Amino acid sequence: MVVAALAGDTSAVVIAARRWLGTPYVHQASVCGAGCDCLGLLRGVWRDLRGAEPASVPAYGPDWSETGGTEPLWQALERYLKPAAAPLEAGQVLLFRMRAGSVAKHLGIVSSVSVPRFIHAYSGHGVVESNLGPPWARRVVARFDLI
């Protein structure tokens, strides 16, 4: 179902992302309520707001790209989304580098800025809304606008 969203209406992004809360973590999946990973969450929100995905996603392992040193997720985000020019804002897509020297491979969607929070999916937790406190904030390497 495509949600009608006005250009620049970031609240539509947050509403769409919150529909996924409680979805179990399933690697490479993207089905609301049944299972997804962090990329699957973004793919599902994209479909809700923009319709069909712009490209198919190749299979990837949990440790994808760790040895190659390339940034395929970052490159894909740059291809399909625009870098966020505004300060942190609800609806922005966050890209995280989980360890120094590793590739950026975790995604989340900002859900609140007054008390910084974001929605993401990760193993053992599924789709949750977390505080964007210092442990998470220091890992953000890029922000993008979804709409």
Image: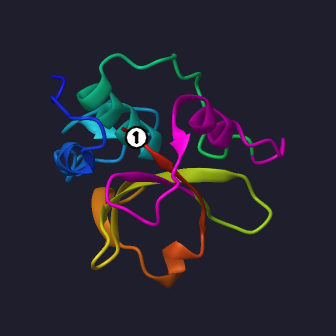
- In x, y percent, where is residue 58? 59, 21
Q: Residue drawn at (35%, 41%), measured in percent from left and top?
A: 41
Image-based side of 17 in relation to 132, left or right: left
Task: State the residue lying farthest toward the bottom.
Answer: 134
Residue wearing tag 1: 146
Closer to the camera in the image, 92 or 28: 92
SS at circle 1:
loop
Q: Residue drawn at (47%, 18%), measured in percent from left and top?
A: 54
Q: Callout 1, which amino acid?
A: Leu
Note whether 68 is above or below 128 in the view shown.
above
In this figure, which colouring scheme has been used for the structure?
rainbow
Label 1 Cα neighbours within 10 Å, binned few <14 / some 14-19 / many ≥20: many
- In x, y percent, where is residue 23? 23, 46
- Is 137 covered by the magenta stretch? no
Closer to the camera in the image, 101 or 118: 118
User: For residue 26, which quarter of the picture?
Assistant: top left
Closer to the camera in the image, 32 or 91: 91
The range drawn in magenta is 66-95
User: For residue 64, which quarter of the picture?
Assistant: top right
Q: Which quadrant of the figure contains the N terminus?
A: top left
Q: Residue drawn at (15%, 29%), measured in percent from left and top?
A: 4
Note whether 118 is above or below 123 in the view shown.
below
Image-based side of 139 in relation to 44, left or right: right
Closer to the camera in the image, 97 or 123: 97
